[in-house]
Amino acid sequence: RGMLDSDRQQVLTLGHVWTLPFGKGHKFLPNIAGVGRQILEGWQFSGITLVESGLPFTPALANQSSINSDIVTRPDIVPGADFYNVPGGQSRNLWFNPAAFKIPGLYQYGNAGNTILRGPNFRNADWALFKTFPISETKKLELRWETFNTWNHANLANPNASVDAGPGSAGVITSLLPATGMRQMQIGLRLAF
């Protein structure tokens, strides 16, 4: 019994399209004319921003000798121990407190529950700045600058959940979430006719 591996307790999704307030009928530079007006007026800022709590995971034992089997078992919880009390605070080098768990007695399964720990939060912003230049009644040119993972935030995967893996391995995060990369940008020019 426990949470799904894909459970996120909190999720904020913000989608937006905002016309920048420059040019005729707007707050800034309302009297601009000529080439300046063509360059500054009509820009739009759009995007999708996501902020989510971390994914759950289950503490486990790498060494199965206490039950003489090759199945994954769970540790016992040390009474009164804080799962996230790590020296210097949580980081990719130590996400949870391995000392909050212990190896259960011989031929016993541990009492640590399923998915009782949570990994790092997820943050991502995909933003775009674009403008449409009318050429004629049926033709227009669109200029777009798009960024993916605009904040260049490293979205970390869950840590090594084996509490008995030893210092430098237990609770250590060694990878990023799948399909999440570093910041990427692209500039595009599109002719619609």
Image: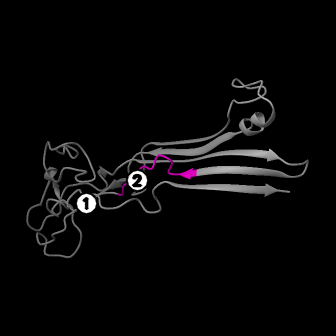
What residue do we see at 13% from left, 71% from top? 67
**Structural distance between the alpha carbons of marks 1 and 2:** 18 Å
Q: Secondary structure at mark 1?
A: loop
Q: Amino acid at mark 2?
A: Asn
In this rendered view, identify the residue nearer to me: 111 or 153.
153
| Magenta part, dominant SS | loop
Identify the image quadrant of the N terminus.
bottom left
Q: Is residue 185 left or right of residue 113?
A: right
Q: Which residues are magenta?
A: 147-157
Q: Amino acid at mark 1?
A: Ala
Badge 1 density bin: few <14, some 14–19, many ≥20, Cα 10 Å: many
Residue highlighted by disc 1: 161
Residue highlighted by disc 2: 155
Q: Position of residue 104 (x, y in %)?
A: 12, 60
Q: Is residue 151 left or right of residue 71?
A: right
Q: Is residue 72 above or below residue 75?
A: below
Q: Earlier in the sequence, mark 1 or mark 2?
A: 2
Q: Position of residue 123 (x, y in %)?
A: 45, 47
